[in-house]
Amino acid sequence: MLKKMLAIVALSSLGVSAYAVDASQVQKSIELKDGSTVYIFKDGKMGMEDKYGRATYMESGHVMETKDGKKIIMNGNEIWRVDELLHKDHRG
């Protein structure tokens, strides 16, 4: 039983590292008028950080206004990728 549990733990830790997000995957970050930040990844998907530094949900297709007054449209909702970026130094 112990061997099975150790095997499960080992396999699940391999799966977690496969989903790790590297900061080099971020093509660009854009500050929004409300203080939040949108991250655009190299694959064209986007994720959002709120003004308090937390990964947050934004519906795909939502129109957002940048700090300089331009409008951009949310493409995707890569909240998990933004969360990984924000907490990469806090996870082992």
Image (cartoon, rainbow, N blue to C red):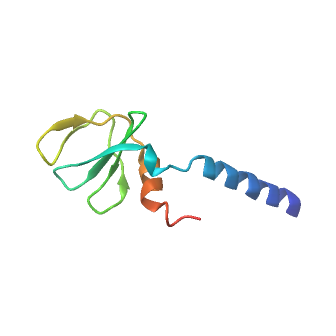
Q: Residue 56, position in %: x, y?
A: 35, 52
Q: Residue at x 46, y 61 (%)?
A: 87
Residue 29, compared with residue 7, is above or below; it is above
Quadrant the N terminus occupies:
bottom right
Location of residue 71 (image quadrant): top left
Give the mark count: 0
Quadrant the C terminus occupies:
bottom right
Q: Residue at x 75, y 56 (%)?
A: 10
Residue 63, compared with residue 88, is above or below; it is above
Q: Is residue 66 left or right of residue 60?
A: left
Residue 1 visible? The answer is no
Q: Residue at x 17, y 44 (%)?
A: 66
Residue 21 visible? The answer is yes
Q: Residue at x 50, y 67 (%)?
A: 90
Query: Which of 8 and 25 lies nearest the eye of the viewer?
Result: 25
Q: Residue 4, position in %: x, y?
A: 85, 56
Residue 79, compared with residue 42, is above or below; it is below
Query: Which of 34 and 25 lies nearest the eye of the viewer?
Result: 25
Of all residues, the one furthest to the left in this rendering is 69
Q: Residue 28, position in %: x, y?
A: 32, 44
